[in-house]
Each structure stands twice: as C-alpha cells, then as structure tokens.
Image (spheres, grey):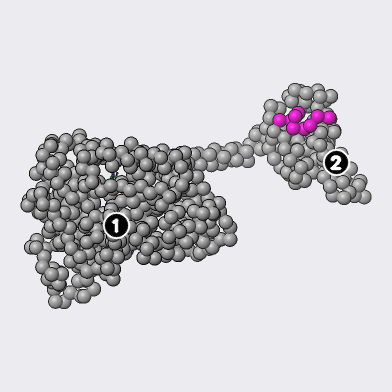
Amino acid sequence: MLKLAAQSMFDTLAQSAMGMMVVDKAHRVVWISEGYKQFLPALGRSEGEFVGRRVEEVVPNTLMAQVVDSGQPMLVDLLTNKAGTFLVSRLPLRDAAGAVIGALGLVLLDHPETTMQPLIGKFAQLQRELAAAREQLAAHLTQQRRPKYTLSSFAGASPQALEVKRQARRVAQTDSAVLLLGETGTGKELLAHGIHAASARAARPFVGVNIAAVPDSLLEAEFFGVAPGAYTGAERKGRDGKFRLAHGGTLFLDEIGDMPLPLQAKLLRVLQEHELEPLGSNEVLRVDVRVIAATSRDLAAMVADGRFRADLYYRLAVLPIRLPPLRERLSDLEALVEMACDDIARRSGMPAKPVSADALEWLAQRDWPGNVRELRNVLEQATLMTDDPVLEAVHFQGGGAAAAGSAAPATAAAAAPVPAQGVAPAAAAGPGFAALPASATSSASAPPPPRPAAPASFAPSAPTPGARWPDAAAVAPAEPPGPAGDEAPRPAAPERLGDAVATLERERILAALAATGGNKLAAARRLGIARATLYEKLRRLALPLR
Ligand SMILES: Nc1ncnc2c1ncn2[C@@H]1O[C@H](COP(=O)(O)OP(=O)(O)OP(=O)(O)O)[C@@H](O)[C@H]1O
C-alpha cells in the first residue's frame, strides 16, 4: 500500500508540477519530467547535454547538491537563474536503510514574482529596508569609531615631540600593548588615536574606556559585556562589552591605574589568552584587540605598593611612551597655540585670532600643570573675552586666564584647603613619579607655587562670561582665604545641615574645576577624591558632567 501511495504521489507531482528532476548521490541528473523539458532551451542545453551531468553544472544557482549532501529538505525556496525565477522544492531521497541516495527537485511555479506578487513584493521591500538600515548602521559606527586624529595631529617639532612621534610610529607597526605615560592634558588620548590610525588596524574600530569615570561595580560589564537574560531590566537583552566592540581594532584604556585589582586579573587573562566570558554566560568569546593603556599615575610605584598587579604592568609596559609635560617643551608653544586657535576658529565659525609675540612670551612664563588642555582652555577663554582682532598679553591676564590658569594663587588657594577624604595626598598622587606635576603631588595640601615671573595681575577678577566652569572667584571668597574653617560660607541659622554641606561641596567642586580648566582628574586630585567619586558628586549635585 505504501509503495502504491509513493508511486501515486510521484506521478501526480510529475504531472501537476511545472517540472521535476531526480539527481543521484553524485549530484548527477538521472531523470527529468516532460514538463521540465520546457526549461532546457533557456538553460542552453539539449536533453542529451542535460541528463547525466552534475546538476550544479547545468542549473545555475541550484541547491540540489546541498540537499543531497546534507540530507535536509528545502520545502520552499526561490531559485533565480538565466531561465527565470521559480518557486521550487527539494527533497532528499533515501533507501530502505535511510541512507541518502539522491534528491528530487520540483519546479512548482514560474514567474512567482507575478503570481505571488504581494508576498514577494513584501519580501523584496523588507530586504531593501534591511540593506539600507545595515548600511546606515555601518556608516554610523564607522563615523563614531574612526580615529579622530592621526599622528600629524600631534603638534610640535621640539626634540621631545619628535621623539614621541618617532616612538608612536614604531609601535604602530607592532601589535603589542602600549603604555602611554604622562601628566594630564599631555596628549595621551590624541596619541592613542594617532597610533591606531597609523597601524594596520586603522580601518577597524577605535574604542575608548575611561576607567576612572565608570563606577567599579559596572566596569566588568563595561569591558566584557552581559549575556542576554543574565539580568532583568535594562540589561535583559544583553549588551556587548568594549572588548567585543573593539574586535579587530584598538581598545584605549584611559586611567588604567584606577582599575580595581580583581578586574586587573581578568584583563590580564584576556590579554594573554585573547578570550573572554561575558557576564552570565558560559560562552567563551575570542577577541582580537590591540590594547593601548594610559595613565598619569606612577604605575611602577603602584606595583611596589601592591596597588597594581606586577604581571599586568609588565604585560602593558612592553612599549612605554612618555609624553613630556608642556613646560619641558616650550619651544612647541607657538605651534600648539596656532593649532588651538585654528580649532577654536573652526568651531566658532569666526576667523582665527593671531597671538602677539608679547602674549606668547607671557604664555611661556606659565607653569601649565594642565598642559596642552589647559593651554587650549586659556586660549578659548581669551578669544571669547575680546573683540580685538589680535590676542595680546593683556587678554590673558584678565579673568579668562584666571579661570583656567591653575597657577593663579588665589584660585588655587580657594580649592586647596579642602581636606583629603581618607586619601593621603602622597598616596592619591602616587609617590616618586617624576612625570607628575608639582601641583598634582601637592594638590591636596598646598596650592602650586606661582612661577616667579608671573605678573601680579594674574589674579581672579569678575566671573568669565562664556567660560565652561564658573570662575573660582565667583564661588570662592574674594579675600585671601584663611584656614579651611573660616572659608566656608556661613549658613543662615535655620538652614539645614545637609543643605549647607551640599552648598559647600558644590562651591569647592566648582572652584577646583575652574582652577583646572574643567579637567576632572586634576580637580579630583585637588579635592583629594577619586575621579569616579567626583563624577558621582557632579551627578548628585546636578552639575554638568562635561
Ligand atoms: N601635541 C599636541 N598637539 C595638539 N593638540 C594636543 C597635543 N597634546 C594635547 N593636545 C590637545 O590637548 C587636549 C588634551 O589632550 P588629551 O585628552 O589627549 O590628553 P590626555 O593626556 O589624554 O589627558 P588626560 O590624562 O587628562 O585624559 C586635547 O584637546 C588634545 O587635542
């Protein structure tokens, strides 16, 4: 009975389908139905040239061979080749023992684009939309992750700057980890972009993580990602970690010295084995990522103190590059000023203002603990402060420079008396690190001394219009401050203690940010707190994070 049913079904299909063929285990066409012969002219074959040949040679784009090889049927598919577009079905044929002995192919409909127009139209529309969305996403990601700078963006022709660029070009040729050492604002992030752009990975993503800005409890997920379903709520769908996002490219780990010890062990494992496990997953992912780490801390001293793993340090410090502070390469000042003025002009849409020789000389007298970032802030504020076509020394000696000039005695003093919160100044700054600025190592205890040549007029004046952070003078007492206790504003008697503390905290944070030109790390050091704590306080006090 079953045999009869099979025979009957075969005959019915052979008559009702537009065409049918049978291939053997070696993919050879062994039989075609009468109906199938109508397609032979379009396929450019006579029956003699068709039967007996391997199906993939005579029917372009067919998947019959896969059905034979896999034993899996393809119940409905669209096949397009020079004979047209067809709705087809492919079924494996088996012997009594179940072994695949060939396949049966059915042409169910030709011109499905007309007969099945609504369905195929919808399919084609969805495919077009998908392709457009993929293209947009790829363009967006490329835009987002393209290196912002190349090595030529690193301005300066001093022997120190040329040496930095020489080393950067050399490490760009390798795939080893790189460690960038230098004070805040010396261009570590810029150089990391440049190394990536000069490396074989330039066309792949550049992904940065500022370790100090991410709370410790979130860092692991940030690095390694979260598997779908590992958590409820926002993380339910899972999320890719930075390592995965940087796959094939470069991962920039800023403030590596702030990485908690347990995570250091996990990072080391990824660097050694190129494998990671997203949180809540048993799956091991292979990643191909080049790591560039940066720090303004003395990592070697942290290793000696047991605050940084020695094995991770040696892994990262294979190729260290030290970026000199601005005061050690003052011959680059003019080039840096020019580049910054061009940038400011581009962003503001106004013509660039030249800086006079007097002004340059005055700028060269400064200490620049915030380095190139501070220089740029000072130039930006001076530009905003005046309508004069040329920037003269006098434009820097007013409130604009005071807001960002970290060497301003009263500005620094306003922030200095804040007691370190459980962090000894020396420990917070990292002892014995030659590259640390005097202001960083002494930040929690004393203001940085002004350079002898600094003019007396370099003192805070009225609040700076347009400055990113309010002038320290606007939030700190105008009189030279006395001891810390005297300096706090006196709350009105009914004022609640919590409010008074928040007011004081806000003032001290704003003063520290104003004194460091908005630099969070330097401000946190001045306040004697970790950068992550500063971010948390900014959020809590509803102060701008950027
Ligand atoms: N050599 C340079 N040429 C041109 N611009 C520079 C140079 N060095 C630094 N800058 C500019 O100074 C600013 C600070 O640089 P960057 O963020 O790279 O410093 P950083 O060392 O990573 O600072 P931090 O340690 O605070 O993160 C940026 O606007 C950068 O473009």
Residue at image x 21%, y 75%? 497
Task: Find residue 447 and report its image quarter.
Answer: bottom left
Residue under pointer 1: 433
Left or right: 80, with 416 as reference point: right
Residue 509, given in percent of the width and then of the height, sits at: 23, 62
Residue under pointer 2: 10
What amino acid is labelled 1 in the image? Phe
Q: Nearer the viewer, residue 168 or 113?
A: 168
Q: Is residue 320 visible in the rendered structure shown here?
A: yes
From the viewer's perspective, is residue 309 above or below residue 168?
Answer: below
What amino acid is labelled 2 in the image? Phe
Residue at image x 16%, y 44%? 364
Q: Is residue 385 visible in the rendered structure shown here?
A: no
Residue at image x 29%, y 68%? 423
* Region in magenta: 52-60
Q: Which of 514 and 6 is in front in this view?
A: 514
From the viewer's perspective, is residue 351 above or below residue 438?
Answer: above
**Does any atom of ligand 1 lie closer than 8 Å to the CB of label 2?**
no
